[in-house]
């Protein structure tokens, strides 16, 4: 078989038609087969500028460029991942959601989004990555951005924050309809540096004690697509953020019938009674807290026989009027809790035995009810199992024993959770209600993506409230 690995050249063909001359420039390889010369066309170069075609022709001949000097590659910029993200943005229509008309602010925001996906960092580092002298990718070339300044980037954040309502309305129109499920949850991020008005001390989900924080609530449709995000002061309680979401969905988005899905810390009984119950078009899917489950157990509404056939059963209770209660049992979760409880009890007993020994030693024994109680409290506070022990503390001694009754009562509820909903069975089945509640994991996944895995909303380098809102919205 003839070899076709030889050199290539540019072949130009000319033809005349009705007093017009047409030229075609082809990239070809010539080879010999059976004593005959044949040509293999590799590509058509006719669409290229004439000077470029001439340069290609000379370079393939081994001739130097016109200026006579050798070509030198000064630098090459990574390109593939930039194109992948930009094409994804175009395919899902995000660029049109930002603004229908092209503008420099829109291009800068797209650049900030791409940079946040590829390599999250401060706005200053993004500016460096966009400048021609210090570019790390081809992003600025693809978007036609030249001479980007820090001031322009901050103005782009302000432009995005001012358009947030309009963008969220577009997303809602695209992804929501009447009767839809809405997943809502709240998270927080700690803050270091100068304190804006939004930054307050509150319950830290990041376990960063001593740091102020901001709180933000993320609203997603039933498929987990983020639609809206709102930033609250750091000392805002989760349930108190629900009212603004209801108003947003019904008035701004124009959705009259909606089902809110929230965890038991968000959709509490009090919040349901104050914000949702009795309001036409508003329904909910949530879960009972541990005190509510214990109340059902005391009423004999939850019994082991419920789970003889399957790990799901529907019950009712006068304490939850107009609601369906779906009792579920997760055997794997039950096993994990049994194992975890045993480990915590053993770890606590080991440390409590050390305190008992300290009170009984001959040399400098531990004395004083307050001192003994302080050490005991530290141990029980560390492992959170103090309710499972009966303690006897005096000025000169300390003893303890397990409270087997409380341990048995808690063990009976291992792996059990109760989903509550106002929806009727003809609207949603028990299985679908449980499945919708479990879909809150999609919001948790979005939070993980924002906070740690991909977009890294922290650290927050902004000092103004509106800039913080724009930064968080950018990460959404």
Image (spheres, rainbow, N blue to C red):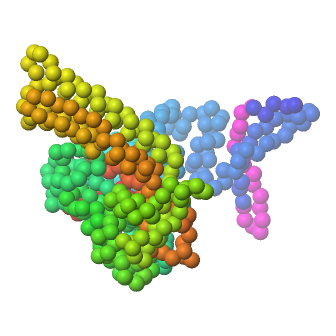
Q: Give coordinates of residue 379: x percent, y percent.
A: 22, 35
- Name the quadrant containing residue 5: top right
List the single residue furthest toward the right. Answer: 34
Q: Relative to 468, is 405 above or below? A: above
In this rendered view, identify the residue nearer to me: 285 or 430.
430
| Residue 411 seen from this side | yes
Q: In which quarter of the image is the N terminus?
A: top right
Query: Is residue 234 rendered magenta in the image?
Result: no
- Name the quadrant containing residue 408: top left
List the single residue furthest toward the top. Answer: 363
Q: Magenta stretch: give its range.
A: 6-21
Left of 437 or right of it: where is 298?
left
Q: Relative to 190, is 29 above or below? A: above
In this rendered view, identify the residue nearer to me: 110 or 338.
338
Residue placed at 46% from the left, 38% from the top? 76
Q: Quadrant of the C terminus?
A: bottom left
Left of 385 or right of it: where is 310?
right
In this rendered view, identify the residue nearer to me: 117 or 21.
117
| Residue 92 seen from this side | no
Q: Give coordinates of residue 454: x percent, y percent.
A: 41, 47
Q: Give coordinates of residue 266: x percent, y percent.
A: 33, 63
Task: Please state the total of marks drawn on the protein image.
Answer: 0
Left of 389 or right of it: where is 304?
right
Left of 426 or right of it: where is 300?
left
Residue placed at 36% from the left, 78% from the top? 277
In this rendered view, identify the residue nearer to me: 105 or 180.
180
Residue placed at 48% from the left, 33% from the top? 72
Q: Give coordinates of residue 323: x percent, y percent.
A: 43, 73
- Name the quadrant containing residue 202: bottom left
């Amino acid at each position: 078989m003839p070899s076709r690995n030889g050199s290539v050249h540019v072949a130009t063909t000319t033809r005349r038609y009705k007093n017009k001359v047409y030229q075609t420039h082809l990239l070809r390889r010539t080879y010999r087969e059976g004593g005959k010369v044949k040509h293999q066309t590799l590509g058509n170069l006719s669409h290229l500028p004439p000077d470029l075609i001439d340069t290609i022709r000379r370079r393939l001949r081994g001739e130097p460029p016109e200026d006579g000097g050798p070509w030198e590659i000064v630098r090459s910029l990574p390109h593939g991942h930039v194109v992948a993200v930009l094409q994804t943005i175009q395919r899902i229509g995000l660029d049109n959601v930002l603004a229908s008309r092209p503008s420099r602010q829109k291009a800068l925001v797209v650049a900030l989004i791409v940079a946040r996906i590829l390599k999250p960092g401060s706005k200053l580092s993004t500016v460096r990555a966009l400048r021609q002298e210090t570019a790390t990718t081809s992003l600025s070339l693809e978007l036609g951005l030249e001479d980007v300044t820090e001031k322009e980037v901050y103005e782009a954040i302000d432009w995005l924050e001012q358009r947030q309502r309009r963008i969220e309305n577009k997303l809602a129109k695209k992804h929501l309809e009447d009767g839809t499920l809405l997943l809502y949850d709240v998270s927080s991020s700690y803050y270091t540096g100068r304190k804006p008005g939004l930054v307050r001390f509150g319950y830290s989900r990041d376990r960063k004690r001593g740091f102020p924080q901001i709180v933000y609530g993320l609203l997603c449709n039933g498929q987990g697509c983020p639609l809206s995000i709102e930033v609250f002061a750091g000392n805002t309680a989760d349930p108190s953020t629900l009212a603004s979401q209801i108003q947003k969905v019904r008035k701004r988005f124009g959705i009259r019938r909606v089902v809110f899905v929230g965890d038991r810390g968000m959709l509490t009984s009090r919040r349901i009674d104050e914000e949702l119950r009795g309001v036409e078009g508003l329904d909910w899917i949530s879960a009972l807290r541990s005190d509510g489950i214990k109340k059902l157990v005391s009423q004999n509404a939850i019994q082991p026989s419920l789970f003889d056939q399957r790990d799901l059963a529907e019950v009712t209770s006068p304490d939850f009027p107009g609601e369906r209660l779906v009792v579920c049992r997760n055997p794997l979760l039950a096993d994990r809790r049994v194992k975890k409880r045993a480990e915590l009890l053993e770890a606590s007993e080991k440390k409590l035995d050390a305190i008992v020994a300290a009170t009984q030693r001959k040399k400098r024994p531990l004395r004083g009810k307050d001192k003994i109680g302080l050490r005991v409290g530290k141990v029980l506070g560390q492992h959170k199992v103090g309710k499972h022990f009966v303690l006897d503390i005096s000025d000169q001694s300390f003893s303890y024993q397990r409270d087997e009754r409380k341990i048995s009562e808690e063990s009976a509820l291992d792996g059990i959770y109760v989903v509550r909903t106002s929806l009727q069975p003809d609207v949603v089945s028990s299985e679908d209600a449980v499945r919708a509640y479990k879909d809150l994991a999609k919001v948790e996944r979005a939070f993980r993506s924002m906070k740690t895995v991909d977009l890294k909303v922290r650290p927050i380098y902004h000092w103004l409230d509106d800039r913080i809102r724009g930064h968080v919205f950018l990460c959404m």
